[in-house]
Amino acid sequence: MSDIIDLINWNGLLSQSGSTDYTLFAAATEATSEVVAESGAEEGTLILAGVLLSLVVIYFASKLGGEICSRINLPPVLGELVGGVVIGVSVFHLLVFPEGGALATDSLIINFLESTAGLTPEAAESVFATQSEVIGLLSELGVIILLFEIGLESDLKELIRVGPQAAVVAVVGVVAPFAAGTAGLVYIFNVPAIPAIFAGAALTATSIGITAKVLAELGQLSSKEGQIIIGAAVLDDVLGIVVLAVVASLVKTGEVKIANIGILIVSAGAFLVGSILIGRLISPYIVGLVNEMNTRGQVLLTGLVFAFSLSYIATAIHLEGILGAFAAGLILAETEKRRELEEQVIPVADVLVPIFFVVVGAKTDLSVLNPAVPSNREGLIVATFLILVAILGKVITGFTVFGQPDLNKLSIGVGMIPRGEVGLVFAGVGSASGALSESTDAAIIVMVITTTFIAPPLLRLVFKETDAVAQSNSTPSLEE
């Protein structure tokens, strides 16, 4: 950087002296360009180094946390989340992000690069921002791959069959916590209307990624309960987008634009139904194209092209990309290439999905749980209320499914509890808008953390109890 400044100053001196020596001027300009290019290349190398170090830390934390949880009979995904908390903003500051208010000086990875790779303080912020953006994009790609994998493991016919039940669960899971949370904050805690509405909206979210991963680990993804949970979570995601759009519009303008909400609802419904119907028509041609290919990876790459295309379309019409990936998985699961594609996508998921869960944990700031800070106390009281509403508002959804006495209704409600990254999106939008006070913002974060971490062990517990009851009922007694 100092070389660039010296060269620029030298060019200025040439101009001031009135020199007309074009050769000297051209040489100076060429030298300046070379230094700038060299500086840019060096910065790009350091960005790559930062990303590589971040991935080393992420994979180490995910495997260590996952192995520990696996050995104490807890879902490995919980270990990945906890591993993210440990390396993130709450503890070691190895993985921090600018959107959370962190600076380059807060990142131990950036400090390590300054000590070992010659990263200058002037370039640190740029490297930190770009490195964080790359990790964030890999995290988003990870959840897209996860939902594609989950779609492949799901049964579209079964999902359609449980559609009405899933729709009821989704609607109740949105309306109940939203109404109870908003009313309680307004009438019990005297929170102003707009922050109360935003907090109530945050209660509607469901993290399909976390629940789906736990269900897959438990072997319950294809069960009727699992299909209802997944179907309801997908619908929940669509409804959550609509709710977020309403609240964001209310915060910015003070009025809800019905036209925008109508467009979102129509586009979401048209996308989900249209992509599945059209996809089922073109899937035979996709399989035929794959069968004509001779190069390696034709099944995996063709499947990913299809999944990414639907994810792009979903994103382009202001829906979530994960909906497109999930729809692609559902469509390809009905083809003859299902098993082969499932096997080939597993290594890809093993590389990208842990990034998503560790990043979710790394972004959660547990300092809001410290009651010694006066500003946190009010938030903790409100958080306790939000946690109760968040849990009960989702648990009751399972009991809205009538006429099926053999269904594990409690597991359906528990499966809808985790807010995860979806809740963090609500909290982030609310904080950025300035609509939330510090205590309300802290309360939402505490609610998201709590529901995210308690749902996996609770889900495993309710399914284990159901299996135990079923096994005892199927075992003949000694008298028989």
Image (cartoon, helix red, strand yellow):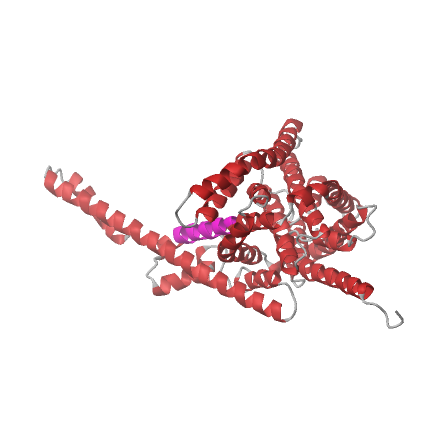
Viewer-nearest residue: 62 or 363:
62
> Which residue is farthest right?
479
Q: Quadrant of the C terminus?
A: bottom right
Q: Residue at x 62, y 45 (%)?
A: 426
> Does residue 390 show up?
yes
Give coordinates of residue 301: x percent, y percent: 45, 46
Query: Which of these two is toward me, 472 or 460?
Result: 472
**Which secondary structure type mostly characterizes the magenta part of the structure?**
helix
- Examine the image and state in which quarter residue 446 appears: bottom right
* Direction bottom: furthest residue: 478
Quick check: 363 above or below 30? below
Taking the image as shown, residue 404 lies to the left or right of residue 351, namely right
Residue stretch rendered in magenta on the structure: 125-141
User: What residue sits 60% from the left and 46% below the top?
Assistant: 425
Residue 248 in picture, x, y percent from top left: 62, 37
Depth check: give the residue in front, 387 or 218.
218
User: Any magenta on residue 268?
Assistant: no
Relative horizontal placement of residue 302, taking residue 65 as reference (left or right): left
Left or right, 318 with respect to 104, comes to: right
Q: How many marks?
A: 0
Q: Residue at x 59, y 70 (%)?
A: 68
Q: Is residue 287 above or below residue 69?
A: above
Q: Percent position (x, y) of residue 468?
A: 77, 65
